[in-house]
Amino acid sequence: MNLNNGVSLKTNSSHLSYVILLSFIILIVLAGLGWFGLSHIEKEIQSNVLSQLTDRLPHSIKMIKIWKRGVKMDVSTIASDKNLQSKIHALIKHAQEVQGDASGIVRSEELKAIRQYLEPIQTNNSFTGFSILNEEGFEIGSLGDEGIGAQRLVNAPEGERLLKFASLGNTFITLPFKSEFSRPGKKGALMLVGSPIYQSTGKFVAVLIFYLQPEAVFTEIFGISRSGKSGETYAFDYKGRLLTKSRFEADLRQVGNLEPSASSILNITIKDPGGNLLEGHQPLLAPDEQPFTRMAQSALKKESGFDIEGYRDYRGVRVVGVWSWLSEFRFGVASEIEYEEAYSLLYEIKKSFYGVFGFLVLAACGVIGLAWRQGQINLALVETTEMARKANLAKSEFLSRMSHELRTPLNAILGFSQLLQMGSEYKQSSDVQSKVDPILKAGNHLLELVDEVLELSKIEEGKLKVSIEPVETFEIKNEVLDLVKPMAEQESVVLIDQCPIENSLFVMADRLRLKQILVNLITNAIKYNKAGGSVTLTQKIENQNLIFRVEDNGPGIKEEDKTLIFKPFERLGAEGSGVEGTGIGLSIAKNLIELMNGSIGFTSEVGKGSCFYFALPLTDKPSNFEEKTDQKPGNFDTSKNIKTVLYIEDNPINLELVEQVLGGEEHIRLIAASNGGLGIQAAREQSPNLILLDINLPDTDGISVFKKLKSFDNTSHIPVIALSADAMESDKKLAMDLGFYSYIAKPIDISNFRRSIDDALSKTS
Ligand code: ADP
């Protein structure tokens, strides 16, 4: 199992976290930029709206002034006409003669002459009527007969003022006011324009008055300043009543704020109904109790101002506007436009922004969702990978324990088989021989399998440690060739050594492991070969690496098998060929090489042979390097004293095996202890010449026993040979570092075992 998958999945999931984070950051930055941009645009649009509105108002005021001056001039021109004046003088005289009697005036030729004279003038100037008042304010002439002889105009809201101004010599225009006689026989709003009439002596004798409909020119002048679909510029009096015709009369009638036949002039007061009437709002307050609109409240205080944030107008619709109170005219003017229309561009921009932003949010949500989902999948994969890793570890641990447990009985099987093989019965009886040989062969194969499984398990558990140091390769190569030579001879395969004959190439490696790898590759090249075949060993330097090459001219490896070759337990069909093996060797070799920071590869062609190579980093010769000298084992002199060997071992079968192994040696006295405590006691009491110590004891571990032995004066000098089923190199190294004389792995190789004992005893006195 490739544990890197877990790592890469975790890396992927952390990449996905970055994607999510990045999406959030981009969104936040976009939102920030958008907000900043929008508020900037909003301010621009607001100031644009304000400047449009403020431009409009002075324009309307100017127009009104021009119109007013024009009307006054027209009327004073008419009034100063000598012909008309003499007719009015005649009428005044006649009225005096009939003592103001209305019917006498109505029937008079003087009035008839004035009517004939003024009618076309009135029509030409868009007046809807005229009246002539004498200096007391009595009506002595008019277009219709109704008011003749009465003071109706003086009693009208603006009439008295008009008479007063005229008597002072001014031509005067009234504000619109409600009248019963706006046109002959008609109610409505009316404006009057009056100019004084003098006698030839210069004495004020009458006022010539023309009637004006405020719906006409007055309203139209303000109408010119309207903008868009909802812009309105209007005038209002000190009571807050409209003086110009509302643009929205139809709406006002529809919501019941205006009688069907009535004009909005003077009938609509600029009050805030509290909600949009056009959207069906029903005012909670009676019209009298409603407050003035934001604009009217300010203007009626004779203030000028503006509001671009929005307020409700007399329809309850949100508008923005500017206003001003014109004291000179005695009315206020306002220019307003519906908020929605004024800011329609802003609406559009906001809509587009929110649309784009919404899309981005959705897209980001999509990305985040996908990333989240991917993350979940990855998490599941990580969990699955982790589970698989744990399962793999559990498997490795199981195999490791199993292998360990198998070594103990194997020790007995192989040990006794070896004894049988060495015994005299063995040599005599071919029957025994034929039975013992397969046991030994199968036992050795089983041992090899157990060892390799154990090693692979350790690698997979991550427990296998390599001690990397500068290793001289010439010596290693020679040792390996010595080891494999017998096998090559047996298989009739020629070993060719083409490595440079020099002693100065060092690689960074674990000495024993390097040897193990070379042995594995060379034995493979011998095993998977043919009689008469050859195996060539070469070395070459490439990119600061030393490359070892093991080349054979065996059968080669099929294309389809090439990807499987480093997988554990893959024998690629060799299992049926009679060649012994486990299918684990190359897998271990690859793992070991990688642990030593190297790499392995191969080339192979069916029918031509294979070449396995591996590279390890080159290094300089270490300064403290010493050439090794062979240590010849000392020969034990049998004539010397009998030596005592203490064997501390709990397993009776192993004890019996060692008893039998040493049984023929008359110079050796074997004593035994079945646990650590008894062993230490025996050692202290009997002072043996050599101690054989099982490392896996029931009461305490062999290492602790060893340390105790070293701590007592009378036992510290005794050589101790470790016997252990833990066949790992690291265990061996640990023991040797502690000071054990030697370390023998179970199952014991009897010849080696005897040699070790002889060697140790030869050094004791
Ligand atoms: P084994 O114990 O089977 O030799 P290895 O892991 O060393 O296990 O090798 C795996 C398989 O690769 C072998 O079983 C064999 O089929 C094939 N193999 C290894 N080395 C060679 C070689 N030099 N030539 C041909 N086949 C080889």
Image: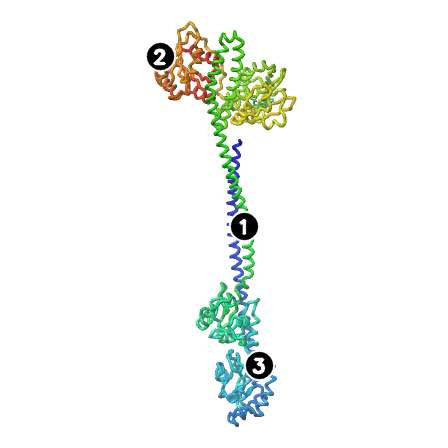
Horizontal and vertical percent position of residue 377: 52, 40
Kindly report the distance in space between the C-alpha atoms of the residues bearing marks 1 and 3. Answer: 67 Å
Where disc 3 sits, the SS reads loop
As displayed, is residue 598 above or below residue 762? below
Q: Earlier in the sequence, mark 1 or mark 3?
A: 3
Residue 1, image x and y in percent?
A: 53, 31
Instruction: Tell me which numbered mark, 2 or 1, is placed earlier along the sequence.
Output: 1
Helix, strand or loop status at disc 2: helix
Dots 3, 2 in contact, CB < 8 A: no
As measured in the structure, the alpha-carbon distance from the residue carrying label 2 to the one carrying label 1 is 88 Å
Marks 2 & 1, CB-CB < 8 Å contact: no
Q: Residue under circle 1?
A: 362
Q: Is residue 687 visible?
A: yes
Whether residue 82 can be seen here: no
Residue drawn where x is 46% and y is 75% of the image = 239
Q: Which mark is residue 127?
A: 3
Residue 439: % across, % down: 52, 15
Split into quadrants, the picture shows ligand 1 in the one at: top right
Q: Residues within 10 Å of mark 2 (few under 14, many from 20)?
A: some
- In terms of depth relative to the viewer, which is nearer, 287 or 451? 451
Q: Which residue is mark 2?
A: 686
Q: Nearer the viewer, mark 1 or mark 3?
A: 1
Nearer the camera: disc 3 or disc 2: 2
**Image position of 723 with respect to 153: above or below:** above
Give amino acid for label 1: Leu
Amino acid carrying mark 3 in the image: Phe
Q: Which mark is residue 173?
A: none
**Image quadrant containing the C terminus:** top left
Look at the numbered discs 1 and 3 and tell me whether their residues touch, using CB distance below 8 Å.
no
Mark 3 or mark 2: whose residue is earlier in sequence = 3
